[in-house]
Structures are given as C-alpha cells and as structure tokens.
C-alpha cells in the first residue's frame, strides 16, 4: 500500500491543478468506444485497477491477494480519426504466501514500462451502421515487452450505447525468453440517464495461451458500470466479479467454477479523464 | 458474492430501463431535449448555400454527432443555443472557420 501513496498523490495534485481543463468521456472501463479524441485534443487519464482475491487453497495458496495496477495516460488527437497515447505503467502486488510455513506476507512494486497506444477510427459511428476503430499498443519495460491489438466496434441508439472489443496480445516475459498469448472479448452496454450520468453493464472474457501451445484458462467477468461526465472531466467505474472460470491445465485454484490461478474473484477499475 | 452480483446487475438494469419507460412518445435525448435524425439537413436559405449545407452536414457528423445525438436547435432559446455552441466548439476543438460554418448551419434549423 505504501507504494501507492506517491501515485495517488500525483493524481490528486493533477486533479487539483486542472479544474479548468476539459475532457472527452468513456462510458466503460474495459471496453473502448470507437470515437477518438478530436484533432488537437489533449487529455490526461488516470487508471486505477484493483484485482482482488484469489485463493489460499489449491496450488495457488495466495491469501488476501491484491494487485493494484496504476496507469497514467497522456492522449493526443492527431486528427479527427487518429489518436496516440503515452502510458506509464506500474503495479503493486501483495498476498499471504501459504506455501511457506509459517505463511509469510509478500508485497512487490513493479514499474512495468511505457506503452504507446494508437487508435485509428476507420468508420465513424455517426455515418455507418457501427463505428470501427483499430488499436495497436506496444509496451516495453526492459525485461518484458507486449504488443496488444484490438478491433473496436460500437454504436449509439438514442440514449443507449454499446461497444464490443476483440483483443489479442502477445507478451514476452522472463527477460523476453517466454511468450504468452492473451485473447479477450469485452462488451459494454450503457444508457445515458441525463447529460452527466450513464449506467450499464460490462462483460469481459479473458483467456491465456502460454507459448500459444495450449489454451490454459478462461475467466468471465460481468458487472455494473457507472460513469459521470462534466464539460472538463469525466470518470467511470466498474465492479466486475468473476462469474465463471476454468483452468484446462488441472485445477490449481481448487475451485470448480472459478479460475483463481491467474484471475481474481473481483476486478474493480476506476478511470478519471481530464482534458488539458 | 452471487447475491451481491445479482443485486448490482438488477440495480444497473433498473436504473437504465426505468427512465426509458417514463420517456414520452416523442423522440427525446438524454437531456430531455428533442433530437433530430443524424442525416437531417436544413433547407437552403439566404446566407447558406447548398455547398455549405453539404460541408456543414459533414462537419456535424464528424465533430458533433459522432459523440452525441443531434439535438434540435429549434427547441432552444437563442441565448441558450449560443452558449451551447461556444461550449461544444471548445470541446470539439473546432477551428474558427469550422465554428463559424457550423453556427450558420445549425442556425438554419431554427425558425
């Protein structure tokens, strides 16, 4: 937790300094919508994700597991169709290690490198049946690297809005010696209640494929999403419990309907955006 | 956990659907203001050529309607509409010539 304090302080300071800024808004936290920042737009975003609670049982043996992922993003609208973002990524992990006797507490803070996100809107949702945006995000941290691609679809119907993301990522870990594939589908549906508030549901299915040889696991999360926007800033929050999961490589989590080796029981994500 | 999930999902669904049930038959946006179809066009008038209508419509789709519904300018008071134009022009990062054209384009929807 002590590692989080500087990050939270930085965020609070930025928020306090930028009360006169403005922002573009997201209605979901995992699913991107096809719209990108307008040309000339500049936005700061703080991402806070809590991945909490695996299991102290099975082969996992991680009691009170908490993983905080912190990302600071600076996004710029290069054109009305293309935006580029720079991210700083960090993570703080803690749990009680029940493989030890007696159990020992572990905590670790990692700077996970910088990433550059590129989003290109191919089809404007206002002019087509659905909006389509392509996404490419390379990340590098010295001993790890990742390339993530997404196909982003979405559309508005009156006060309703949906977004569907199909994602694939290749990660090189262990000093770039091990490869892992990830496939993810996320879907969001939200309704604007008024100019400021939206509520809805978000669903996410995440899969891991080590070395692309086996499909190791899958986890399905679903939960409510709420977002609030003002002229100059916006925020969105999801609380997503895992409702189903499976590990196809045995049952290391010791749970028959959740995957708890690489996925948590609950994921919570808060986004705050401020236009500069 | 399952109860918490069910309660959260139910609350989100209710919050989303119930306001929709209260909406009148007329098509209104989230601000309760009537909205136009995204492909609505004003009639040509003095000070706004057919070419400018075409450009204005493209600009409206690319800068306005892609992010929100097309609220009917005719249902706003003059000062209120002008205030929205200033606010949204900043938000959409309109260039001065784009803001000028869109102001005239949307004014053509007003009586």
Image (spheres, rainbow, N blue to C red):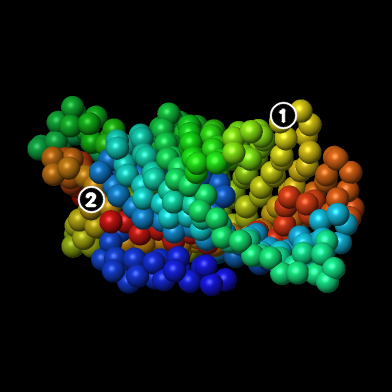
> Comparing marks 1 and 2, which lies closer to the viewer?
1
What is the chain identity of the residue bearing mark 2? B
Location of mark 1 (residue): A212
Residue at image location 54% in from the left, 38% down from the top: A145
Q: Position of residue A214 (x, y in %)?
A: 79, 31
As drawn, A5 above or below A38 = below
What is the chain identity of the residue bearing mark 1? A
Instruction: Work out whether residue A199 or residue A232 is closer to the camera in this orientation and state it.
Output: A232
Quarter of the N terminus of chain A within the rendering: bottom right
Between the residue at mark 1 and the residue at mark 2, the CA separation in whole angstroms equals 48 Å
Image position of A142 (left or right of A39): right
Q: Quadrant of residue B96?
A: top left
Q: Residues within 10 Å of mark 2 (few under 14, many from 20)?
A: many
Q: Give the SS element for disc 1.
A: loop
Q: Residues within 10 Å of mark 1 (few under 14, many from 20)?
A: few
Residue at image location 45% in from the left, 45% down from the top: A114
Please indicate, yes or no, whether residue A50 appears anywhere in the rendered image. Answer: yes
As drawn, B33 above or below B36 = below
Q: Quadrant of residue A100?
A: bottom right
Location of mark 2 (residue): B89
Please indicate, yes or no, whether residue A169 appears anywhere in the rendered image. Answer: no
Residue at image location 62% in from the left, 44% down from the top: A186
Mark 1 touching mark 2, by CB under 8 A?
A: no
Q: Position of residue A227 (x, y in %)?
A: 50, 61
Residue A225 numbered tag: none
Q: Give the SS element for disc 2.
A: helix
Instruction: Work out whether residue A186 or residue A57 is closer to the camera in this orientation and state it.
Output: A57
Residue at image location 48% in from the left, 55% down from the top: A71
As drawn, A84 above or below B51 = below
Q: Position of residue B76 (x, y in %)?
A: 27, 59
Image position of A218 (left or right of A232): right
């Amino acid at each position: 937790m002590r590692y989080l304090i500087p990050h939270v302080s930085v965020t609070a300071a930025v928020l306090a300094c930028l009360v006169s800024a403005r922002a573009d808004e997201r209605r979901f936290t995992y699913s991107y919508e096809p719209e990108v920042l307008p040309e000339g737009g500049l936005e700061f975003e703080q991402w806070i994700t809590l991945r909490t609670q695996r299991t102290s049982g099975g082969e996992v043996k991680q009691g009170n597991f908490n993983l905080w992922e912190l990302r600071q993003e600076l996004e710029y609208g290069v054109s009305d169709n293309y935006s580029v973002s720079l991210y700083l990524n960090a993570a703080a992990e803690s749990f009680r290690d029940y493989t030890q006797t007696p159990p020992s507490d572990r905590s670790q803070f990692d700077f996970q490198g910088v990433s550059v996100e590129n989003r290109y809107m191919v089809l404007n949702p206002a002019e087509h049946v659905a909006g389509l945006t392509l996404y490419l995000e390379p990340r590098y941290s010295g001993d790890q690297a990742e390339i993530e691609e997404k196909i982003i679809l979405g559309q508005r119907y009156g006060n309703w809005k949906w977004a569907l993301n199909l994602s694939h990522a290749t990660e090189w870990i262990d000093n770039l010696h091990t490869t892992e594939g990830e496939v993810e589908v996320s879907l969001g549906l939200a309704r604007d209640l008024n100019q400021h508030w939206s509520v809805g549901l978000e669903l996410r299915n995440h899969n891991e494929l080590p070395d692309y040889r086996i499909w190791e696991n899958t986890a399905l999360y679903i939960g409510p999403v709420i977002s609030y926007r003002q002229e100059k800033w916006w925020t969105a929050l999801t609380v997503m419990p895992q409702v189903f999961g499976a590990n196809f490589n045995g049952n290391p989590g010791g749970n028959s309907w959740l995957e708890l080796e690489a996925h948590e029981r609950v994921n919570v994500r808060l986004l705050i955006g401020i236009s500069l | 956990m399952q109860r918490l999930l069910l309660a959260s999902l139910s609350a989100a669904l209710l919050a989303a659907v119930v306001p929709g049930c209260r909406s009148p038959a007329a098509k209104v946006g989230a601000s309760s203001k009537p909205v136009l179809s995204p492909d609505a066009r004003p009639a040509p008038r003095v000070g706004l050529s057919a070419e400018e209508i075409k450009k204005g419509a493209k600009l409206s789709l690319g800068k306005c309607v892609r992010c929100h519904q097309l609220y009917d300018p005719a249902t706003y008071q003059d000062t209120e509409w002008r205030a929205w134009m200033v606010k949204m022009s900043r938000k959409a990062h309109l260039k001065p010539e784009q803001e000028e054209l869109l102001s005239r384009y949307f004014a053509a929807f007003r009586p």
